[in-house]
Amino acid sequence: MSLIERSFRERIVLVGVVSWPRGLDEVEASLDELSLLVDTAGADEAARVIQARDAPDPATYLGRGKAEELHRLCEEVDADTVVFDEELTPAQQRNLEQILGRTAIDRTAVILDIFAQNARTEEGRAQVELALLRYRLPRLRGRGLSLSQQAGGIGTRGPGETQLEVDRRRIMRRIAKLEGELRALEATRHTQRRSRRRGSLRSVSLVGYTNAGKSTLLNALTDADVLVENRLFATVDPRTRRLELPGGEVVLCSDTVGFVRKLPHQLVEAFHSTLEVVADADLLVHVVDGSARDPKGAVDAVHRVLAEIGAEDVPELYCFNKADLDPDAAKRLSAATPGSVTCSGRTGEGTDRLLAAIAEHLRIHDRTLELQIPYERGDVLAALHRAGEVLDQRDTGSGLAVRVRLDEAARQRFAAFGEPDRADSNGDEALSHPDDHEDPA
């Protein structure tokens, strides 16, 4: 069952606290985003409350007096649930529900709920369930002795095992089972990545804030036909497709889950194996909504998550998307970010510039060299076209002299053809795995 019931549109009161170093503008922006999250989860904002404090109250987050005032507001607007912008401790959540007389949840619960709605694959559902169980475990509450095992037999004392202990043990068993399943899926994913590396296919990952248009851009670049919706976290399960660059090179392009401010650590931990595709990428295309109110805040939030998953050192290309919605804003952002591009995944405008920029960034670490290919080795010439960019070829009488731009892995793979006298003897060994990769599409 989801954390927010969806049999009808619930009425929600949003609550935030202004405390150093967070200012009022930052809290307002965070609550605006929380309102969008609540709407995505299937509820409506009825009111919002902001309190200025030196620090959140350890018992009731707001303080007892403000909590009582919040209770009266909930009665006035007929609110079903109160959602807090910061993560609540189990004690705070319990105390608030006693005061408010209704459900009190936090931003983390709302995000987990949205992920639970949108996960489609076996791995995605397992990752979301694992994150939910880790979140719920410390928040289990006892139900009195009515559901506890009663004493029985000779010499037993006390009420036996409480229902709380039974529930906790069941959740721990389920967590262990899910962790085992995800380890097996992670091993499979690792094998696939190793196969792709052996095939010399480089990878590009689309990263960015949620609803920045990454899936739309993937569709525009690769005809992937993945789900596209104008709402937060429409994409939970990653998608990988083959992408052909202007020079003829083929790379793997992956669409990843969108990031958000204060992304729950339970999700980052549960989705770690999925997010490894980002850390292992040769290039990150950082997709930014060019029409967003606070693009810098979105960029900073993405960078925080990238640092958490160990991908902060991967080369990055900024792409200011949705240029069709606000062309002037997108151009200003691109002008202030050297090397970036603007485009529209919806209309396709600028995608050719994006492909050229991706190719250029990947070529920075490539090197141009000349290879001698015998006439009878047409398979080698075809493999060169797949592995790199063939710049020129000419007839030498005994074969073809091919000038090609290759990355380090491909240079080692075709090293035998760098010296004409070794081409015939070692050519077969050098191309023992010319197509040893899977097409994820």
Image: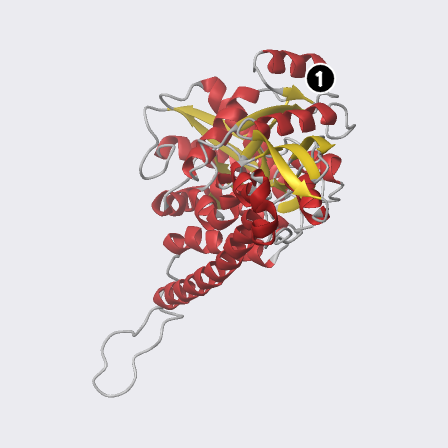
Given residues 79 and 22, the one toward you in this image is 22
Q: Residues within 10 Å of mark 1 (few under 14, many from 20)?
A: some
Q: Mark 1 sits on what residue?
A: 326
Q: Position of residue 178 (x, y in %)?
A: 47, 61
Q: Secondary structure at mark 1?
A: loop
Q: Does 138 appear above or below 265?
A: below
**Which residue corresponds to the image point at 79% horizontal and 27% vertical from the top-left?**
347
Q: Residue at 58% of width from left, 32% of height from top?
A: 35
Toward the viewer: 391 or 131? 391
Q: Residue at x 61, y 11 (%)?
A: 335
Return the x and y of residue 221 as percentages of the image width and height: 72, 35
Q: Residue 170: x, y in percent?
A: 41, 67
Residue type at mark 1: give it: Asp
Residue 337 drawn above or below residue 165 = above
| 128 in relation to 281, above or below | below
Q: Is residue 21 left or right of residue 106?
A: left
180 and 153: which is toward the camera: 180
Q: In this rendering, does residue 291 appear at all?
A: no
Rendering coords of residue 259 (x, y %): 54, 36
Q: Residue at x 35, y 75 (%)?
A: 149
Nearer the observer, 439 or 112 = 439
